[in-house]
Amino acid sequence: MPDYARHATLLRSKQDVELDSSLRSSGRVADPAPSRRSLRRVIHIAPIPTPEIAKQLREFLGPQLLRLTLDADVAAIDSWIREESKPSEVYERRLREAHEAWQLVCLMESPDTTRAWWMGMKDALNELSPAEAIALDRGRDVMAVARAYVESG
């Protein structure tokens, strides 16, 4: 365990002991700490407005590849970017899944390489590209492939 983590753990346990003893002396008893198994993973994602996501993806993928990825009309995508209309739940989910996968691969690769990755067929997606898989609502599979790609270096 790194030094900073050990220090934080010791500090936290010291605070817990002090809190527990002060509650006992006041007659109140502290609730037992929840078990690790009962704790759920908490993820905080700063929300990016849907028009901004669509704009970024259109910029990097281009209008036709984004159309293929979302299985949507280019005119509809443009209206989402201009905020003239809002995408349905399905399209918003596809936009967010595509953006998340895109950002993950972009951490390791240039935008051009990421675009090529986006168009290439993947064994784990049954010979579909990430663009085609997202259009078929297989965003989780695309994220798994993106993670594997990034982890493989």
Image (cartoon, grey):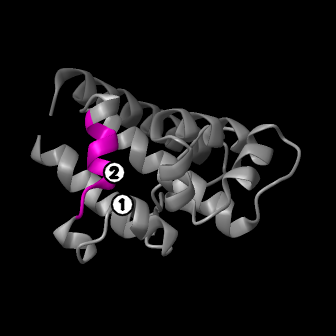
Q: Return the residue nearer the eye: 122 or 15.
A: 122
Image position of 93 with respect to 28: above or below: below
Main SS, magenta region, reads helix
Residue shown at 15% from the left, 34% from the top = 1
Give the quadrant of residue 70.
bottom right
Which class describes the residues within 10 Å of circle 1: few (<14), some (14-19), or many (20+)? many
Are the residues tagged 2 and 1 within 8 Å (C-beta)?
Answer: yes
Left or right for 6, reference 143: left
What range of the chain is rendered magenta? 113-121
In percent of width and height, residue 49 lies at 72, 39
In percent of width and height, residue 33 lies at 47, 57
Which class describes the residues within 10 Å of circle 2: few (<14), some (14-19), or many (20+)? many
In percent of width and height, residue 72 lies at 64, 63
Q: Is residue 129 magenta?
A: no
Image position of 90 with respect to 103: above or below: below
Q: Quadrant of the C terminus?
A: top left
Q: Amino acid at mark 1?
A: Pro
Residue tagged 1: 130
Which numbered circle lies on residue 118? 2
Label 1 SS: helix
Label 2 SS: helix
- Spatial CA distance of label 2 from label 1 is 5 Å
Left or right for 84, reference 141: right
Left or right for 44, reference 117: right
| Residue 9 is at least partly visible in this image | no
Give the quadrant of residue 89.
bottom right
Q: Amino acid at mark 2?
A: Trp
